[in-house]
Amino acid sequence: MVLENKNTDLYLEEDQSYRDTISTVDKEGKRIWLYPKNPKGKLTNYRKLLSVFFIALMIAGPFIKIQGEPILLLNIIERKFIIFGKIFWPQDFHIFLLVMIAFVIFIGLFTVVYGRVFCGWVCPQTIFMESVFRKIEYWIEGDWKARITLDKSSMNANKIIKKTSKHLIFFGLSFIIANIFLSYILGVEKLTKLVVEGPSEHAGALIALLGFTAAFYGVYARFREQVCTTVCPYGRLQGVLLDKNSLVVIYDYIRGETRGRLKPKEDRAALGKGDCISCHQCVDVCPMGIDIRNGTQLECTNCTACMDACNHIMTSIGKPQGLIRIDSEASVCEKKPFKFTPRIIAYTIVLMILSSIIISLLAFRSDIETTMLRTPGVLFQRLPNNEISNLYNIKMINKTNREIKIDIKILSGKGKLKLIGNDLVIPSQGTAQTSAFIILDKNDINQFKTDIKLAAYEESKELDNFTTTFIGPINN
Ligand code: SF4
Ligand code: SF4
């Protein structure tokens, strides 16, 4: 995003070459290791609370059951997916696809209007990095300056103890996270069974567990913010999703410029100085290593740490808070408070509609799926009493975890259905096949092919309805 304002020409003329590179890579292409300052403030406290809530939810997730099924299971190995306790089969792929499409549109529209708030506040990568691993690092090695000193110091007993203990804890935590992750793929019961039976019987499970542990350890110990800037596709899309009306964490350059150090008893207004006192606190706390005063940048996750830091400075020098705040570039540029424009309202309505579609698709999916087709190679049979019958093969899939006894009824027109064999019972998460006759009176047949609507009931509750065709003689 390029800042535009006629009154800030000087600001705009500043070197914008920082946009050509990412902040954590130097001219030689080497990684610049970040030492962000431990953030403090109101928003940081809110973020901590939210992180505790999300971490508790992530840990508890595999244990939370709805009608005996986990709240979320994404078993890609066995192609079994459970969302909010509902089992999605390969036959439900169309629903899955629609939900995914709706979800992608939702994310896109949400970002256009409300910015990248997901990254800084909800994304598991940020939550674990900033609220767990970074906190342990501060606890063991101290705040940023102590960490810089420690890293620059030669190897001694203190450094060995601190580094070893930190990495051991990181590895242990990565192992726990790998277990949580795998329990969303395999299910907590199956994972427990694999662990209890031991690596001698399930070497593959152990390899997978160690592989995920190593991956998480690598991400949180070394790769860190690079995930957000170089790997995450959502992060890389920011350049096209955000525009000047999007809500972002933004530096009010009109109020802040021209920046300059605070000197005792100076009249900053008379000197043409803005409210930014060049204290660098907003840069020091940034976990992505950027200077938000340069404008909105790809790396910014909207974590709001810089807002807390600047608000603290503004309060201490007797200026109003909000020099860095959540606002749109258009509002800052035009010096107008953020307004809900018709476009934002329209997008919000679309978001609400999409949310309803996603919820309805998930909530109202039928518990069973029925296929009823005429038996191949068999035409119609003439029966006594002036009746015609067709033979059908019925296949039913039970998508729930309970056994279902099915009663099939004809909804359209006259006729009767006669099941061949015993009661139709579908085992939990299983399939059942049977055959049946549909019998119509000859006088009710007006065409060669007649559509027959049917429904499957569990007691009096309709679970599924479907259509099949009936063939019969046109001229009696
Ligand atoms: S924290 Fe605020 S005052 Fe300090 S450099 Fe950043 S924007 Fe300027
Ligand atoms: S610029 Fe501010 S909001 Fe963006 S990542 Fe850095 S500290 Fe967080």
Image (tube, rainbow, N blue to C red):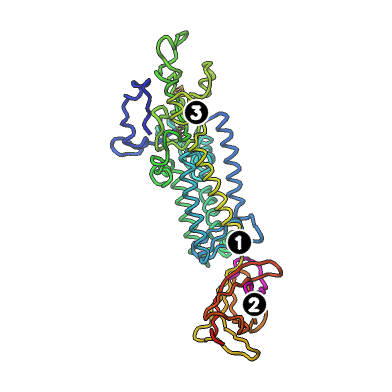
Q: Amino acid at mark 3?
A: Arg
Which residue is most to the right?
459
Q: Position of residue 116 (x, y in %)?
A: 47, 39
Residue 222 in sight in this render: no
State whether residue 293 is above or below residue 31: above
Name the N-terminal-most of marks 3 and 1: 1
Q: Is mark 1 within 8 Å of ligand 2?
A: no
Residue occupying image coordinates x 63% and y 55%: 63
Which residue is the extreme one toward the bottom? 384
Of badges 3 and 2, nearer the viewer stands 2
SS at mark 1 in the image = helix
Residue 45 location (% of width, % of height) = 58, 33
The quadrant of the picture occupied by the C terminus is bottom right
Mark 3 or mark 1, whichever is nearer to me? 3
Q: Which segment did they paint magenta?
A: 397-414
Type of amino acid at the residue the image marks with label 2: Lys
Residue that label 2 marks: 414
Farthest residue to the front: give it: 475
Residue density around tag 3, few if under 14, some if 14–19, many if 20 or more, within 10 Å: many
| Left or right: 240, with 316 as reference point | left
Mark 2 secondary-structure assignment: loop
Residue 250 occupies which quadrant of the picture?
top left
Q: How far from the left and from the top, in percent, is residue 188?
A: 59, 59
Residue named by callout 1 = 189
Q: Nearer the viewer, residue 388 or 184?
A: 388
Residue of label 3: 325
Disc 1 marks a residue whose amino acid type is Glu
What distance separates the C-alpha of mark 3 from that of mark 1? 46 Å
